[in-house]
């Protein structure tokens, strides 16, 4: 039987929708997971034909399990992952066990912020940055002087706003760099200029050298202890200068990385000196991204990505062209979730196409330190982007997390 193997899956979001899409395309779905909780909740994953518990970091264990599947008669059509830390591993395995249309070397560059910055060091879209290698200590003398404040301090393997710190002066920079070095002694630290400007996310699929831009999304960022994206405007109409500027960056990145086939997303900021690359990731964005693109344009991006991976031709032809806004819900204090109210009212609100609440009763929830600490979202459409945004925000206000605060 034709089988697609997924390394890791979340309970919801793009990675789960990719598994569902694979099943709908007629493939036997296998998921390797390191989550015992998912095994205990096995009945909640009916779209996964085989859910296998193993160490997803141990590549030899993964290979042994793939060989076992082959011996049982599974024809491995694709090995993939829609989870950030497993995309490179999946491509390594695909190189060995099936036809891999992706470049594993390219994925390695995209998956690691240190490699990204070094690879694109001479490009106009690269922010000014300094790389502090793991062997270099963090005394005050090692802090760069060529950068103006504020700056961003990042772990080179960070994702989802985790371990990305803002520093407004030398003392904050010193403290942030020291914190990251203590937490990740084997990783490099990136110190780079802070770009003040609107931020956009761009979803891209490349098929046989043809670049297909699936969506351009303007992001709304809430700044607390971290920079957390809490709002997404899927642009049904894009200003010509913005579309042209983003198109040039996408073309340059695709060309320089020599991408013939692949799916990736960029985060870009439009600053005083033009477009600057915040980061690249070799997969679709997680969370509600696939759902909001589907609400806007009518196609299923993860399904089209799977078609590309399995040798078929993806199509990103728009079936609709709706203004869509997605509002995420975060909380202000930490505690144990007693209950959630208002989901029904939010769902029945005008323009709302989907409401999702992530945590269950008894879960410990907290103010956001990463994108994973966003606990609900509302997707809404409108006649204009302003209307879609207003409808989503009003509906999101209905959702209330009742928390027993930790003492």
Image (spheres, grey):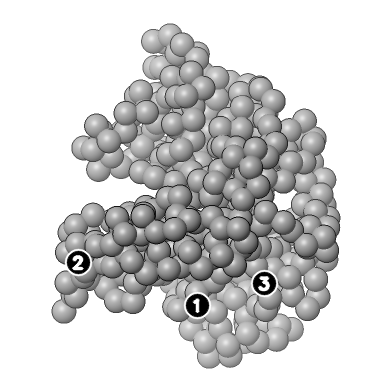
Identify the mark at residue 336; answer none if there is no mark.
2
Q: Give the answer, above or below, for where 46 lies relative to 329.
A: above
- The structure residue drawn at horizontal position 74% and vertical position 58%, both measured from the top left corner, is 238
Image quadrant holding the C terminus, namely bottom left
- The structure residue drawn at horizontal position 67% and vertical position 30%, both measured from the top left corner, is 314
Left or right: where 351 falls relative to 272: left
Q: Is residue 65 visible?
A: yes
Percent position of residue 41, x then y: 23, 38
- The structure residue drawn at horizontal position 39% and vertical position 10%, both measured from the top left corner, is 72
Residue closest to the eye, 48 or 242 = 242
Q: Name the image quarter holding residue 39.
A: top left
Q: Are marks 2 and 1 in contact (CB under 8 Å)?
A: no
Q: Give the answer, above or below, for where 223 lies relative to 352.
A: below
Left or right: where 210 falls relative to 354: right
Q: Give the answer, above or below, for where 62 lies relative to 327.
A: above
Q: CA distance from mark 2 to mark 1?
A: 23 Å
Q: Are marks 3 and 1 in contact (CB under 8 Å)?
A: no
Identify the mark at residue 223; answer none if there is no mark.
1
Residue neighbourhood size for the residue with mark 3, other residues' Cα within 10 Å, grouped as few (<14), some (14–19), many (≥20): some
Say which residue label 3 marks.
198
Percent position of residue 78, x then y: 55, 25
Left or right: where 21 falls relative to 237: left
Residue closest to the eye, 142 or 28 = 28
Percent position of residue 329, x then y: 39, 66
Q: Give whichever of discs 3 and 1 has the lower sequence position.
A: 3
Element at label 1: strand
Q: Give whichever of discs 2 and 1 has the lower sequence position.
A: 1
Left or right: where 68 falls relative to 128: left
Q: Name the image quarter holding residue 123.
A: bottom right
Q: Are marks 3 and 2 in contact (CB under 8 Å)?
A: no
Residue neighbourhood size for the residue with mark 1, other residues' Cα within 10 Å, grouped as few (<14), some (14–19), many (≥20): few
Q: Name the image quarter holding residue 309.
A: top right
């Amino acid at each position: 039987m034709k089988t697609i193997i997924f390394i890791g899956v979340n309970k919801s979001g793009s990675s789960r929708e990719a598994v569902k899409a694979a099943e709908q395309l007629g493939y036997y779905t296998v998921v390797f997971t390191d989550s015992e909780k998912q095994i205990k909740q096995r009945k909640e994953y009916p779209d996964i034909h085989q859910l296998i518990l193993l160490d997803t970091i141990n590549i030899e264990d993964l290979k042994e399990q793939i060989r076992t599947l082959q011996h049982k008669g599974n024809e491995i059509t694709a090995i993939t992952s829609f989870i950030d830390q497993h995309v490179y591993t999946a491509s390594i395995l695909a190189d060995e066990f099936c036809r891999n249309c992706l470049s594993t070397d390219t994925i390695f560059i995209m998956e690691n912020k240190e490699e990204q910055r070094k690879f694109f060091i001479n490009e106009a879209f690269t922010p000014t940055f300094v790389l502090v290698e793991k062997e270099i200590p963090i005394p005050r003398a090692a802090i760069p002087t060529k950068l103006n404040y504020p700056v961003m301090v990042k772990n080179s393997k960070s994702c989802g706003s985790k371990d990305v710190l803002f520093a407004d002066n030398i003392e904050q920079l010193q403290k942030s760099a020291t914190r990251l070095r203590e937490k990740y002694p084997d990783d490099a630290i990136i110190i780079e200029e802070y770009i003040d400007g609107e931020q956009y996310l761009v979803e891209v699929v490349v098929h046989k050298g043809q670049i297909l831009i699936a969506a351009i999304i303007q992001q709304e960022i809430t700044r607390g202890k971290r920079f957390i994206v809490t709002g997404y405007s899927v642009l049904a109409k894009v200003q010509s200068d913005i579309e042209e500027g983003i198109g040039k960056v996408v073309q340059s990145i695709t060309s320089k990385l020599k991408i013939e086939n692949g799916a990736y997303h960029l985060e870009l900021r439009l600053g005083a000196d033009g477009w600057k690359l915040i980061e690249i990731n070799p997969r679709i964005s997680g969370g509600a991204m696939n759902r909001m693109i589907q609400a806007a344009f009518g196609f299923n991006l993860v399904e089209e990505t799977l078609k590309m991976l399995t040798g078929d031709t993806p199509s990103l032809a728009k079936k609709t062209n709706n203004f869509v806004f997605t509002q995420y819900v975060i909380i202000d204090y930490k505690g144990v979730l007693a209950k959630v109210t208002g989901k029904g009212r939010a769902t029945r609100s005008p323009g709302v196409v989907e409401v999702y609440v992530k945590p269950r009763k008894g879960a410990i929830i907290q103010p956001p330190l990463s994108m994973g600490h966003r606990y609900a979202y509302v997707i809404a459409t409108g006649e204009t982007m302003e209307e879609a945004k207003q409808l989503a925000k009003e509906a999101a206000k209905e959702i209330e997390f009742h928390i027993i605060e930790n003492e």
